[in-house]
Amino acid sequence: MNELLAPIHSFLQCETPDAWVDKAADKDNLAVVLTDHLICELKAAQSAMFLIRRYAVDKESGDALLAWLKPFEDFAYRKEGDWQSLLKHNKLSKSIIPKSGTPYGQELIDKMVLLIKEELHHFFQVLEIMNEYDIPYENIASSRYAKGMLRHVRTHEPAALTDKLICGAYIEARSCERFAKLAPHVDKRLGDFYISLLRSEARHYQDYLTLAEEIAGADIAERIAFFGEIEAELIASPDEDFKFHSGLPVQRI
């Protein structure tokens, strides 16, 4: 596991504070941690799908992607459908073809479609665990984390896409780091689940970073460092809204 995590620790500019780990391991906060983790898995799939639809495919393929995600969104946002039936919906109804004139389209599709499949499978797995622990699903608001990075994305292309991919890399890397930190402090069922996620999360981080480097066609070290500073500030600074990607917990008096 150390070999798997070494690039993650090198990439991130700070570690998750121990105070966050302590709060996340508290059984009183289990519902918040699992529910936010659940929503994070769906948002990761949505973000990857947006990138494919925005940059790589025509409308017909884009519509097929939306249909793939719809049962999961209906359950999460509109409380429609049975969570136990979601697993059978985790498949595409047609082949996704890159639109012409997009040199990176096929690679973006290949990496992001695999990521979406895995994130939706993780979404289902979190629901299974919530059911085992008798935690009802209730939608909750997102944390400041992703928005805090994405507001710094440049507005012209391909710089905007490069920045979005770098942000995606940081989100996946932080998730991997937090799963590894939290696993020893929770019960075996949950700890084993977190450990099982590490390899895919680490690959997702690397896929985002590889795509960012290839699409930029130039050295992106400065942008990686720029977003790394923003990400570290969001993780290390006080945060009253405790979530899976929140910052330093604030003690309420």
Image: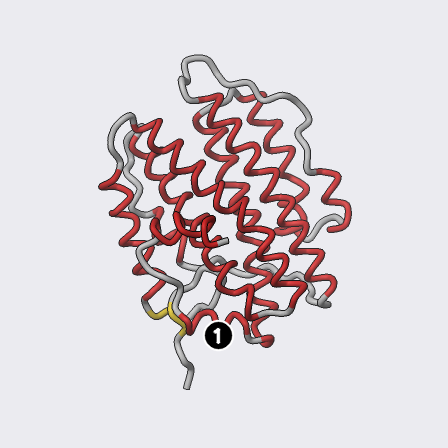
Residue 59 image offset from top left, x and y in percent: 54, 22
Residue 50 image offset from top left, x and y in percent: 49, 35
109 lies above or below 76 = above
For residue 129, which quarter of the picture?
bottom right
> Is 137 left, or right, of 36 in this rendering?
right
> Is 189 left, or right, of 112 in this rendering?
right
For residue 205, which quarter of the picture?
top left
95 lies above or below 84 = above
Decide which of 163, 186 is in the foreground and name it.
186
Q: Residue at x 56, y 57 (%)?
A: 37
- Outermost left residue: 222
Q: Which corner quadrant holds the C terminus?
A: bottom left
Q: Residue at x 48, y 74 (%)?
A: 22
Name the residue carrying label 1. 22
Residue 65 image offset from top left, x and y in percent: 59, 30
> Is 68 left, or right, of 251 in this rendering?
right
Q: Say few, some or many: other residues with alpha carbon within 10 Å of mark 1 (under 14 / 14 to 19 / 20 or more).
A: few
Q: Residue at x 39, y 65 (%)?
A: 247
Residue 41 image offset from top left, x and y in percent: 56, 49
Q: Amino acid at mark 1?
A: Asp
- Outermost bottom residue: 253
Decide which of 71, 114 is in the foreground and name it.
114
Q: Residue at x 56, y 32 (%)?
A: 113
253 lies above or below 17 = below
The kind of secondary structure element at disc 1 is helix
